[in-house]
Image (cartoon, grey):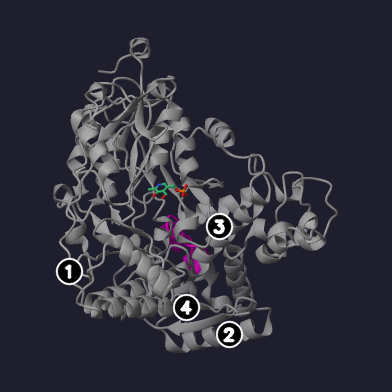
Amino acid sequence: MRKPVSRVLVINDEILILREFVKGLNAAARSLDNPLGLVFLGMTTASEALARIESDGDVQAAIVDDKLYSLDGGKSKKLQMTAVELVQRITRLRPEIDVYILIAQEQEDEVVDTLFAEAVDGYFYREERDYRGMYRIVNAEIQERARTPFYDQLKNYVWMAKDSWHTPGHSSGESLRGSPWINDFYEFIGEHIFDVDLSVSVPVLDSLLEPRGVIAEAQGMAAKAFGSRRTFFATNGTSTANKVIFQTLLAPGEKLLLDRHCHKSVHYGVVLSGAHPVYLNSSVNRKYGLYGPAPKQAILEAIEANPDAEALILTSCTYDGLRYDLPPIVEAAHAKGIKVIIDEAWYGFARFHPAFRPTALEAGADYATQSTHKVMSAFSQASMIHVNDPTFNEHIFRENFNMHTSTSPQYAMIASLDVARKQMMMEGYKLLARTLALAAELRDQINSTGVFRVLELDELLPEEVRDDGIRLDPTKVTVDISRCGYTVEDLQRELFTRFNIQVEKSTFNTVTLLLTIGTTRSKVSRLYDALMRIAREGRAARRLVQFPDVPEFTRLRCLPRDAYYCGGEAVPLLDEKDNLNEGLIERVCADQIVPYPPGIPVLVPGQVITRPILDFLVGSLRSQKRLELHGIVYDGYVPCLRVLKAGEEQGLKRLG
Ligand SMILES: Cc1ncc(COP(=O)(O)O)c(C=O)c1O
């Protein structure tokens, strides 16, 4: 097993003193228990130290001499930075690492007061030269960060090998192990997945539904790591996390401002909470068939026009990596007392590298939901809900959380959240720096094929959001494939069958590749090799496939929840002559109709159906392209929409 290395910088411009410190601390590290591989390194200037912290992901702590960075600013020697500034710059770069200040005893009050508000983890008296004491403290703090309270307890419990007289029924895999019929499943999946599959009957493992022990501790550590006041582990993905927050913030009939392009869980959340949605018509890149963010102006106008809204939800970054300039939006929403929820399903890692910040929480959002499983080392469905809402109602939140959470959550999933957090704390910066470097290499390599082309921010941005300060997450790489001669389906098949490569998603003219902290250089070169071979086949380029115009969102006749819970009736999309069924125009839809890809609804429950919407749906049904239409009801082979009956419509409160 690979052992960690934890470098600790000691920053002092007096070379002799510095040498003495580094020697003393390293001697202490050698003579004392050192499981995390602490090594102390001397730095004589602030800039050298900052450069090292930036380039070396194994730096886990810094000990800064305050004398260097004299607080009076007057007689600074070679260095130009005060301790406050240096601490600020270190924390801006790497908020997760520990920072200590070396001070003279007689200056203690002054220095401690000045640095109190900064992220300083402790102080040492310079004159004491207590290297073993210092080592113990620095080591203990790094060990504290590297703890995984839930996972540790789970592991201990498994090793205790208690006889199980409780759920789950497989009883640590016993029911599979001895079975001639299903023991292959046990062998394939592995014994520990069964060993750790435990339940609330084991009190030492705490309860996800009322955490007071190791789960509470693990969530507390996640809150610290991700910069939130409170963090909750969700075991049914961000799909559920979004719904829990809606039900916490919104009573039936209360207004929610939402990007129309939000994930379908958000639209389902509207139905469940009974919220009154105000849709922001979002941007679309028609050339490449990509759904963009909502224009800043539209968001600000919606906030202005709906000061009675309770909440605003946006997706940042989007599936394609477009992220909002959030601070002005959050500020405008807060000025009207509107809570801001950011769906960071694709962006949970952002806290751990400055290239991705500010995170939603750093930009002031009240809630952020993250699919830890999508972009970090957690099992599928393992997500986190981060809360910074100053008026957070924990009781209501807890009730809603428990309403959606199984009383038998997967313990391996909870442990994976604990471990994913540890990894990001200890090596997130390093892994993300590597991912960024690989993303840059991959871009160059793809472009060098002369056939495939990576779309950069300029080309990804729809016209309407060009001046909105939107940025691109470079780990999401969208490639124009229109010149390779294959259709997107054929290209994906080719990559899969001939080259063993599965991409993240596609549109008519693009494929999107997702680089994560698990991406390796060899994977990058295999992909490059595959694309180069395809490029060299020299097939004739196709024209860009025109993305069908997505119809405008029309008005809502009633609340989505009211419409959804009506029985309704299924009305065919086509008439007897196979033409568009005019009888559906002006009817009210009872379901969410979502063409997939990309998974953005063209109709939500309560929405009035128009001709352009029907044209779009009928066109999609007839399209040669593989396109699923979620929400369509089939009466035999006849595709239908579920719409409200006249009597049902009359019985409901009209919105417009
Ligand atoms: C923007 C967005 N939000 C939420 C989700 C749902 O996340 P999960 O799969 O964790 O339930 C997705 C999933 O693709 C998504 O793209």
Residue under the image location 51 percent in, 54 percent down: 224
Q: Would the CB of label 4 be found within 8 Å of ligand 1?
A: no
Mark 4 or 2, nearer chain start: 4
Q: Quadrant of residue 11?
A: bottom left
Q: Which residue is mark 3?
A: 379
Say which element carries label 2: helix
Q: What is the distance, in whole Å, between disc 4 and disc 3 at their CAs?
A: 35 Å
Q: Which mark is residue 26?
A: 2
Alpha carbon distance from label 3 to label 1: 40 Å
Instruction: Confirm or deny contact between disc 4 and disc 1 (CB under 8 A).
Output: no
The amino acid sitting under disc 1 is Ala
Is tag 3's residue or tag 2's residue first in the polypeptide sequence? 2
Q: In terms of image quadrants, where is residue 311? A: top left
Among the two numbered marks 4 and 3 on one chain, the one whose residue lies closer to the N terminus: 4
**Labels 3, 1: front one:** 1
Tell me the magenta residue range.
106-122
The CA distance from mark 4 to mark 1 is 55 Å
Callout 4: few (<14), some (14-19), or many (20+) C-alpha neighbours within 10 Å? many
Residue 432 visible from this viewpoint: yes
Q: State the residue at coordinates (79%, 54%).
A: 175
Residue 298 rendering spot, x and y as whole percentages? 19, 38
The amino acid pointed to by label 4 is Leu
Residue 371 sits above or below residue 252 on the image: below
Which amino acid, by three-letter code, is at mark 3?
A: Phe
Q: Is residue 184 rendered to the left or right of residue 307?
A: right
User: Where does label 4 land, which residue?
Assistant: 9
- Amino acid type of the residue tagged 2 in the rendering: Asn
